[in-house]
Image (cartoon, rainbow, N blue to C red):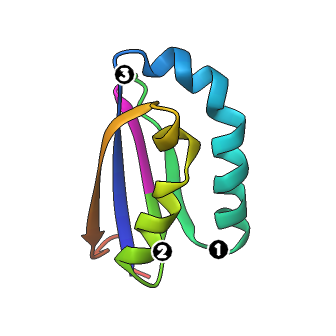
Amino acid sequence: MIFVIIGRDSPDGQEKRKLHRQAHLDRMDLLDKAGKVLLAGPFTDKAGSLIVLEMASLEEVQAFLKDDPYVTQGVFNRYEIHPFMQVFPKK
């Protein structure tokens, strides 16, 4: 299943992002090496980040986010998880 995560930065998210970026990227790298990251990166308007993952279940996504430094250290003050059906590009 594909899941879209939209993480919204807290008011001091940009400062916190600098401190916790490497730890977040290390965790993302593990998912990427497992073939679970379809797309990920920050919004250029500094509003937050978009992460698109292919995982077995919503619970797996929630477990990942629960321990992610951007969540635990307050970079994101809120996030949304949405199941997603890819139409384009056609696989």
Q: Which is the main secondary structure of the residues drawn in magenta?
A: strand
Disc 2 secondary structure class: strand
Q: As displayed, is residue 17 above or below residue 33?
A: above
Q: Nearer the viewer, residue 61 or 39?
A: 61
Residue at image x 40%, y 35%?
A: 76
Whole-number angstrom distance, CA of label 3 to CA of label 1 = 28 Å
Residue 4, image quadrant? bottom left
Q: Position of residue 65 (x, y in %)?
A: 47, 56
Q: Considering only order in the chain, which callout, 1 or 3, is on the residue closer to the N terminus?
A: 1
Q: Amino acid at mark 3?
A: Asp
Frontmost residue, 69 versus 90: 69
Q: Are marks 2 and 1 in contact (CB under 8 Å)?
A: yes
Q: Amino acid at mark 1?
A: Gly
Q: Is residue 57 above or below residue 11?
A: below
The reply to whether residue 89 is visible in this rendering is no
Quadrant, the C terminus: bottom left
The residue that disc 3 covers is 45
Residue beneath the point at 42% across and 15% down: 12
Query: Can you say which quadrant of the picture contains the N terminus?
Result: bottom left
Q: Earlier in the sequence, mark 2 or mark 3?
A: 3
- Tell me which label, 2 or 1, sits earlier in the chain: 1
Q: Quadrant of residue 61?
A: bottom left
In the rendered image, which residue does mark 2 sit on? 54
Secondary structure category for the residue under label 1 = loop
Secondary structure beneath dot 3 equals loop
What mark, if any, has residue 35 been given in the picture?
A: 1
Q: Amino acid at mark 2?
A: Glu
Q: Position of residue 21 (x, y in %)?
A: 64, 33
The residues colored magenta run 47-51
| Residue at 34%, 26% in the rendered image | 47
Left or right of residue 28, residue 15 in this image: left
